[in-house]
Structures are given as C-alpha cells and as structure tokens.
Image (spheres, coloured by chain):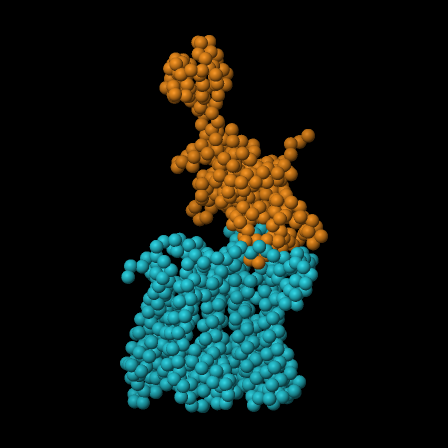
C-alpha cells in the first residue's frame, strides 16, 4: 500500500534515538525478568509450575510495558500535527481522512509489532523451559497484546483529534487506559460474591481490564478473586469489548478527520463582571471560584509566581478542584457512614481501603499534570527567559511554583479527611490506625509531587516531562498493586512485600489493616523510601533549576 | 557643561564558546533617547550581545554598562534598568492581558497601587487598552508584540531591548510598531532594536550597527555607514535631453581619474559615475559641464541604503570595519 503518511510516520518513529534505546532496553529488561525467576535447582520440575511462574512474570511485564509505552504515540500523533499546522496541509492533499488515519494507525501498530517481536526471544526462553502450551498460552498472550495495542491506539488517536495541547492528549489517554486497566478491577474486588446488580456490573466491568484477561489466559484464576471461583469468560468478553471499542473509536476519529477538526473559535475573553447581576450570581453559585471574574491585582507579600500558576493552569484550576474535592469528601463521608452505621456488611478497614485507593488515584491523576511541567512549560513557551529578566531569583520562582502545587495537593489531601473523621468518631479504637494511614497519605502526597517535579525537570518539553512523570508514578503506584493481586501466584510473600514497600497505597492499607494487607510489615520502611526518594527528587529539581538559570 | 555620558556602553565585549567566537571585541555606545538598530545575518552575534546586556550570559572578556551599572556585577540593578522583549512572546494559557501585566509588575516588586496605575499607562502608550480582558494566548501576532512591549515598559526601564519586534507583522502593524518605537524614544527611552526588516529600521534608527560573524563591521548613522561601505560615491547627472548624454559622459571621463566607472543611460537622459573625489572637485566638475553648454537639470549623490550596506558586509571574507564610537 503506497501511503506517504505511513512512510513518514514510520520514519519519524524509528529514526529517533529514544526508539533505538527502547529497542535495546526492552529485550534486556524482559530477559532480566526471566533470569530473576529462572530455576536454579539441578532438578527438573516436570509439573511445569516453575516455568509457568516465569512465563506469568514475563507476560505481566510485557503487558505493563505495552500499556505504559504505547498510548503516548497515538495520543500525540494528531494533536502535534494540528499544532504545527501540518494536519491542515495533509487534509489539503488528495490523501483524504481515511488514508491519513490508517497511515498513522498502521505506523503505530508496526511499532507495537516490533516491540512484540523484540519480546519473542524471551518468550521462546519461557517456552523452552516446558510447561507452556503454544496455542493456549503463547498465541493467546500475543493476541491479547495485539488487542490492547489496537484498543489504546484507536483511543489515543480519537483523543488526539479533540485535544488542544499535547500534554492534555497524553493525560486523557493515559487516564482512560488507567481506568480501563486498573480502576475497572475495583468494583469486582469489592462486590464479588455478593448478590445484586452491583456484583454483575463489577463482573462485567473487570472484563474491560487486560490484566483480568491476562490472569485468565495464564490460568492464574481471577485477579484478586479472594478465593471465589468464577465461570466468566473474561478473555472472550475482553476481546469483544476491545474490538468494539476500537471500531467505535476508529469510526468516530474518521468522522472528525476533515476541515471541522479546526472549528474552534478563538476565545473572546468573556468577563463575568460585565454580565448582568443574575448571571453573576448564578456563576458565583455554580463555579464557587469564577474563572471568568476580573481578578484583582496580586496582593503584596504573596509570591507572584504562585498566583500566576493558579491563574494560568488549565488542568487543576481552583473551581474544578473544589468540585472534585467536594465530591470526594461527600463520597468518603457516605462510605464511612454506611460502614459504621452497619448498612453494608463491609468492614471499616475495607471502607478505609477504598478511601485510600480514591485518595492515591487522585494524587496519581492530578499531581503529574500540575507538577511535572513546572520548569519545562516555562522553557518551552519562552516564559523562563522573561522570568529571568525580572528581579525574581530562580529559587523564588521555583518556590512559587512548588507552593501552587503544595496548596493544590493539600486540598486534595483534605478530600477524604471527613471520611476518616467519621470512622474515628464512631470507632475510636481505630485512631492510631487512621493516624498511620494519614501519615502514609501525607508521604504519598509529598512523594508524588516531588517525583513529578524532579522527573519533569529533566526534560525541556512539556510532553516529555508530563509523560515520563506519569509513567514513573504509575510504575510505582500501580505495578506493585498488580504484583499484590497476584500474591498467591506467581508472586510469593517476600516479593509482594518488597514491591509494596515502594508503593504509596500499600503502606496506607497495611496501616489500616485492610484485607489482604495484614501480612505485610511496610512501616516505617515505606516512609523511609518515600521520604528519601522525595529528597532526591527535590535535589534533582534544585540542581536543574540552578543549571538552567545560571548565566552561560 | 560636560557632555552627558552614554546610557549604553559596550567595550571590547567578547564571548567565546570553546574555540568558537560568537562575539569578537565589540565596542559601541548609545546616548539617551537614541534608537540603535542592530543588524546582522543569523548567527552574527546579535542575540549573544543582547543576552549579555540583560545579564543572561556572561562575556568571556570586555564589559558592558547600562546607565553606569555593569551587566555582570550589577545583574539585579540591570533588571530594573532594562526592559527586554525576546523574539518569542512567552505567553501563558488562561491569562488575560491585564493579569499578564499585573504578574510581571508584581515580579518587579511594584506595589499594587502603583502597579494598577502603571498598567493603565503602558496599555495607553502601546494602544492595548482594548485588549485588557482578552486571553494572551488568543492574541494575534501583532497584538502580542504590542502586549510584549507593554510588558517591557511595566517597570519603567531606561533602556528597552527589543529582539525582532517587527518580525511577522503585517504592513499596518509594522507602521504602528514604528510609530510606537519613535514615541518611546521621544519619551526619553533608549532603544536597542534588532530586525531583519532593514527599510523599517532605517526609518527609525538614529544609529545602526552591522554585525557579521561576531564582529562589528560598521557603526554610525545610515549615511555614515554608507560611506564606510564604499569610498566611491555614486553620482547621477540628469540632463534635459538624451542627445547630450554621450558628450556629458566624455566630459566627465576627462574630469575623473583614469579608469573611473562612467555609465551613460540615454534612455533615462542620465549619466552615472563613481568617484572618490571630494565635494570641492565635484563642484568644479559640475561647473565644467555647465560651462560646456550641457543642460544639467540634476547633479546628485545616490545614498547607499542600509540594505546595500548590509549586503556588502554580509558577503563572506569581508574585513572588520568600523568602531563603535559615535
């Protein structure tokens, strides 16, 4: 097929140094994973259990790699061209939306195929160990991976047509993929074994997760099954769901790949102060903090950079944050009340676990988007040069920026506090547990902020800093929990404990004595890790600030 | 009364990156209220010069002062003395023009009461009052450039340094920009402006400096630079009718040095010639032509414009030219 878009996409994808690095690192990491679990005994295990353990680890690593690596390419593909103006040039050629779309889609699928090819030597090593069937294990694994790639590529391309900024596209795509892969497992974990529609919804929802499908393909039973047997055909449902979603996303994206994609009027800059009194009152009630109100001057003794950050932040602006926090506060209150009043058969620790997950999910979702691009957004927009030409010292600039993140994160931290307060009021015996959980969450808040800021400061582009910060934070926050979900097989007690030691949510749930976390001793090891890593990230941020601000 | 000290003084300023010399012993000075046009091809060292002046880069040797403050030692003082507009606007999302100016005013430590007054003043000066509620990231390029100048004026600096302010502007916006810069000079501000649009620059600059390969090649008024470009002046002799063109050319050849370039143009009833002769000898030559009965209607020197001068210096292997003393 002679498609110039495909040729150009492949060229730009494969000739980057980053891609060469991925091609070298991926087989090395997968090889290392296998080496870690490779049997060292002299005896041969005829049952194949050991080889299956190795294969499960390899499959989980490969799926996680795909989910972390692939969404960034489709998410940035169209929006980047929209911003640089090349999409308008492409649409002006006789190529048409169909060929442009499939050129981009096939190029990303080719990249995914390459990644899968690079994993084949490691897969062959597992196969050579015995105990793994070619058709029901190997082939199914790669079919599952192909479905995941197709799903995230079509989704990313769709998001990219709507996004106005590159980091916005990345954030939304990763957010949806995180929701589909991990958050979708939550309802089933909590409602399995119960009667009613909630259990049915949970059972269906988890089929959207590739992790649940993978666990089923590898014969590991239901992910987080808590000993309950299930007859649901999870891989079958996942296939239907992913193919259906890919088809819908493809049709939807194609319908947008025409001149209408540029139909976005320039904001007139409407000011609420010029509206009628009724409109002003309505907006005040609706927004709480009206973003379109004419703002007063920056008050004295306030760091102007902090105010600037609050004013020009798109994601995480105050009116949205206040609503989010209000919803979370009400949710946590309702959960705590329902548990302690005995209206559900859930234990208080289970409610606490849900609140911890909600809280950590908020941190993971919000923090990188506001903290990762602290320096890179200024460097990219040329704002750093302007800030340097003012008498503000680089340290005051960074402190102002950090302050804007600290206040936001503090607000997010307060989101579930009412829930914990209700728990403590009704069950005073849990005071020390809740206190320890709150300390864990405070460490999590600081860690996610400093990790995002530190990692993000290493890059000069907003896209790169936001993406890498999300990936690193997701790796630390989600992968250990996935390992915990496989705590019966393939992972043993010590592996899970080591993984949870670096995980922000694990320690909080362990502190609350949540089900499944009582066997792990994670405090104060987890605090030392999070605190130490935060200090290291702060040093990285300060060194980077010094490096870019000193006169050359 | 002693002459006023130049506001901007650069002396033997040199910047090296390893073996590469980005700026080579540059010396020039600019008086208060003057507009200096800094001209040069890409990579000539203009931005390096500007960055040293605003304290973003350190020179390898030499020094530069603005209103007596050293650009390296008094970096903090320099920030108050200079208003700098880089070639990139530096916009922020979701920020209105007034908020944008308010932020930079606060960054310069101006109190809220004075800042509000100052914002109104700079918006008035730059003609941006009607944009106050618009988002800065939604402004057109021309609007953005004017808001950029308003930002540089917010702390009332003595010297304004503008990097390519007319780049990408449409003709009307360019005229408005030119008028704005002249207005600022009339207010007593000293301006250093870089631009590739040389006719624009020639119309507003009191002085121009041409740089190539890190060296200052020419410095002075546009006329002075023209002289530095070529010692041979181009003279046009306009005649009443074409029949006298050949006779005039012959008479001119006789009056000039041997081998002088004389070009008759019968279609235009004109003779052009190049000469290094001084004014007095040219006057004698004109008298000789008139006495010979040739009907001369105009006898004029064609000024070398900034574009010609720039092209002359931009040619490879040009030797270093002028000094920067006014």
Q: For this rendering, which residue is in front, B178 or A535?
A: B178
**Residue A221 seen in the figure:** yes
x then y, percent, for residue B146:
57, 46
Q: For this rendering, which residue is in front, A227 or A200?
A: A200
Q: Colour of chain A?
A: cyan
In the shown orientation, is residue A47 left or right of residue A387?
Answer: left
x then y, percent, for residue B282:
47, 17
Q: Quadrant of residue A63?
A: bottom left
Q: From the viewer's perspective, is residue B157 above or below residue A282? A: above
Residue visible at 61% across and 47% down? B128
Residue visible at 57% across and 78% down? A440
Looking at this view, name the residue that lies furthest to the right. Answer: B113
In the shown orientation, is residue A103 left or right of residue A511?
Answer: left
Q: From the viewer's perspective, is residue B202 above or below residue A279? A: above
Q: Colour of chain B?
A: orange
x then y, percent, for residue A400:
61, 61
Q: How many marks?
A: 0
Q: From the viewer's perspective, is residue B228 above or below residue A62? A: above
In the shown orientation, is residue A148 left or right of residue A374?
Answer: left
Q: From the viewer's perspective, is residue A384 above or below residue A61? A: above
Q: For this rendering, which residue is in front, A157 or B150?
A: A157
- Which quadrant does the N terminus of chain A fall into? bottom left
**Residue B323 seen in the figure:** no
x then y, percent, for residue A242:
39, 75
Q: Quadrant of residue A234?
A: bottom left
Residue visible at 56% across and 47% down? B143
Residue visible at 44% across and 63% down? A160
């Amino acid at each position: 097929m002679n498609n110039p878009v495909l040729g150009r996409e492949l060229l730009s994808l494969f000739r980057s140094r980053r891609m060469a690095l991925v091609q070298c690192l991926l087989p090395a990491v997968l090889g290392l994973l296998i080496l870690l679990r490779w049997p060292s005994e002299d005896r041969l295990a005829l049952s194949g259990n050991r080889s299956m353990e190795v294969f499960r680890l390899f499959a989980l690593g490969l799926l996680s790699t795909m989910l972390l690596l692939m969404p960034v390419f489709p998410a940035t593909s169209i929006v980047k061209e929209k911003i640089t103006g090349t999409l308008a040039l492409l649409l002006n050629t006789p190529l048409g939306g169909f060929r442009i779309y499939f050129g981009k889609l096939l190029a990303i699928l080719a990249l995914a195929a390459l990644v899968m090819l690079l994993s084949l030597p490691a897969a062959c090593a597992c196969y050579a160990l015995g105990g793994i069937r070619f058709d029901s294990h190997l082939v199914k694994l790669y079919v599952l991976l192909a479905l995941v790639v197709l799903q995230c590529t079509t989704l990313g391309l769709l998001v990219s047509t709507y996004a106005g900024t590159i980091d916005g596209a990345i954030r939304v795509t990763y957010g949806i993929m995180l929701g589909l892969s991990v958050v979708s497992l939550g309802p089933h974990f909590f409602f399995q074994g119960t009667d009613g529609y909630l259990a049915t919804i949970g059972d269906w929802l988890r089929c959207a997760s590739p992790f649940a499908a993978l666990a089923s393909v590898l014969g590991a039973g239901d992910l987080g099954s808590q000993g309950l047997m299930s007859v649901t055909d999870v891989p079958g449902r996942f296939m239907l769901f992913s193919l259906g979603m890919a088809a819908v996303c493809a049709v939807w994206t194609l319908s947008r790949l025409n001149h209408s994609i540029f139909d976005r009027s320039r904001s007139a800059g409407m000011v609420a102060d010029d509206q009628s009194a009724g409109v002003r009152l309505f907006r005040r009630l609706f927004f709480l903090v009206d973003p379109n109100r004419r703002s007063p001057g920056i008050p004295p003794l306030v760091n102007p950079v902090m105010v600037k950050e609050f004013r020009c932040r798109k994601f995480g602006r105050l009116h949205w944050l206040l609503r989010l926090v209000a919803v979370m506060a009400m949710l946590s209150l309702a959960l705590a009340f329902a548990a302690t009043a005995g209206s559900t058969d859930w234990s208080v620790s289970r409610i606490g676990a849900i609140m911890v997950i909600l809280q950590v999910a908020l941190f993971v979702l919000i923090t990188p988007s506001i903290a990762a691009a602290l320096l890179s957004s200024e460097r990219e927009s040329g704002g750093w040069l302007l800030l340097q030409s003012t008498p503000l010292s680089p340290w005051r600039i960074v402190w102002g920026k950090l302050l804007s993140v600290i206040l936001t994160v503090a607000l997010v931290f307060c989101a579930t506090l009412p829930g914990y307060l209700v728990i403590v009021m009704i069950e005073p015996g849990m005071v020390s547990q809740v206190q320890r959980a709150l300390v864990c969450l405070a460490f999590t808040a600081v860690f996610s902020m400093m990790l995002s800021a530190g990692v993000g400061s290493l890059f000069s582009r907003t896209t790169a800093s936001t993406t890498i910060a999300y990936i690193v934070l997701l790796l630390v926050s989600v992968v250990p929990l996935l390992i915990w979900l496989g705590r019966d097989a393939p992972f043993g007690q010590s592996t899970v404990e080591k993984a949870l030691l670096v995980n922000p949510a694990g320690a909080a749930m362990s502190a609350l004595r949540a089900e499944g976390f009582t066997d792990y001793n994670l405090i104060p090891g987890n605090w030392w890790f999070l605190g130490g890593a935060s200090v290291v990230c702060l040093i990285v941020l300060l060194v980077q600030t010094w490096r870019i601000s000193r006169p050359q | 009364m002693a002459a006023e000290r130049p506001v901007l003084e650069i002396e033997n300023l040199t910047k090296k990156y390893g073996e590469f010399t980005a700026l080579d012993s540059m010396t020039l000075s600019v008086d208060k209220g003057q507009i200096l046009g800094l001209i040069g091809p890409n990579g000539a060292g203009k931005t390096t010069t500007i960055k040293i002046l605003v304290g973003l880069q350190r020179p390898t040797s030499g020094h530069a002062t603005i209103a007596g403050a050293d650009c390296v030692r008094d970096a903090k003082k320099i920030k108050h003395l200079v208003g700098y507009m880089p070639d990139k606007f530096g916009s922020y999302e979701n920020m209105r023009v007034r908020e944008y100016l308010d932020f930079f005013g606060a960054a310069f430590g101006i109190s809220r009461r004075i800042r509000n007054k100052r914002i109104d003043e700079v918006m008035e000066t730059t003609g941006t009052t009607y944009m106050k509620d618009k988002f800065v990231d939604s402004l057109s390029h021309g609007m953005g450039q004017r808001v950029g100048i308003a930002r540089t004026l917010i702390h009332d600096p003595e010297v304004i340094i503008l990097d390519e302010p007319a780049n990408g502007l449409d003709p009307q916006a360019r005229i408005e920009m030119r008028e704005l810069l002249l207005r600022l000079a009339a207010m007593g501000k000293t301006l250093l402006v870089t631009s590739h649009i040389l006719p624009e620059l020639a119309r507003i600059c009191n002085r121009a400096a041409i740089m190539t390969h890190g060296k200052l090649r020419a410095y002075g008024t546009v006329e002075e630079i023209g002289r530095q470009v070529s010692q041979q002046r181009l003279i046009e002799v306009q005649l009443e009718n074409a029949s006298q063109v050949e006779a005039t050319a012959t008479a001119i050849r006789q009056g000039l040095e041997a081998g002088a370039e004389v070009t008759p143009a019968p279609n235009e009833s004109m003779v052009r010639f190049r000469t290094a002769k001084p004014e007095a000898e040219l006057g004698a030559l004109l008298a000789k032509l008139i006495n010979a009965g040739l009907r001369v209607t105009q006898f004029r020197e064609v000024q070398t414009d900034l574009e010609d001068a720039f092209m002359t210096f931009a040619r490879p292997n040009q030797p270093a030219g002028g000094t920067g003393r006014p």
